[in-house]
């Protein structure tokens, strides 16, 4: 388990803070290695943050990136019996 969400390899927050993963390239590599025989769906990046609701069609997440960081930080600090761990109260906010 990572010490912080932003250092975790298994959450999307790390990729949202510092994008580095090329999904299309990863699919090509897996097909070339024959680990993935076919990939019939379009390659899509993480959804973008829209910020708020607007009259037009929206395809992203309907809150801001800052709100997302606060949500991850707040829920990550919750201590529950059915949860593996929690963000330490000694760590600064994300």
Image: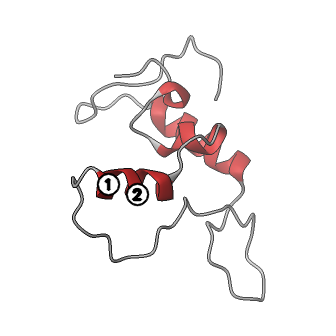
- Is 35 or 58 nearer to us in this picture? 35
Report crowding for label 2: few under 14, some 14 to 19, many 20 or more residues within 10 A (C-alpha). some
- Is 66 or 40 nearer to us in this picture? 40
Q: Tags 2 and 1 in contact by the CB under 8 Å rule? A: yes
Report the residue at 72% width, 67% height from top. 50
Quadrant in the rendering for residue 46 = bottom right
**Residue at image mark 2:** 28
- Report the side of 83 relative to 68 (left or right): left
Quadrant in the rendering for residue 92 = top right
Report the residue at 58% width, 63% height from top. 47
Residue farthest toward the top in the current orientation of the protein: 90
Q: In which quarter of the image is the N terminus?
A: top left
User: Residue 32: which disc?
Assistant: 1
- Is 28 or 76 nearer to us in this picture? 28
Q: Quadrant of the C terminus?
A: top right
Tag 1's secondary structure? Answer: helix
- Is 22 or 1 nearer to us in this picture? 22
69 is higher (above) or lower (below) than 53: above
- Report the side of 22 relative to 62 (left or right): left
Quadrant in the rendering for residue 9 = top left
Report the residue at 61% width, 66% height from top. 61
87 is higher (above) or lower (below) than 62: above
Report crowding for label 1: few under 14, some 14 to 19, many 20 or more residues within 10 A (C-alpha). few
User: Residue 41: which disc?
Assistant: none
Question: How much space separates mark 2 and mark 1, taking CA atoms?
Answer: 6 Å
Color scheme of the displayed model: secondary structure
């Amino acid at each position: 388990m990572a010490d912080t969400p932003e250092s975790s390899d298994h959450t999307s927050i790390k990729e949202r803070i510092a994008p580095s993963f090329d999904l299309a390239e990863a699919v090509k590599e897996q097909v070339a290695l024959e680990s993935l025989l076919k990939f019939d769906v379009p390659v899509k990046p993480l959804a973008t943050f829209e910020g708020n609701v607007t009259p037009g069609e929206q395809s992203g997440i309907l809150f801001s990136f800052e709100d997302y960081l606060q949500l991850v930080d707040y829920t990550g600090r919750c201590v529950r019996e059915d949860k593996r761990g929690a963000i330490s109260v000694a760590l600064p906010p994300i």
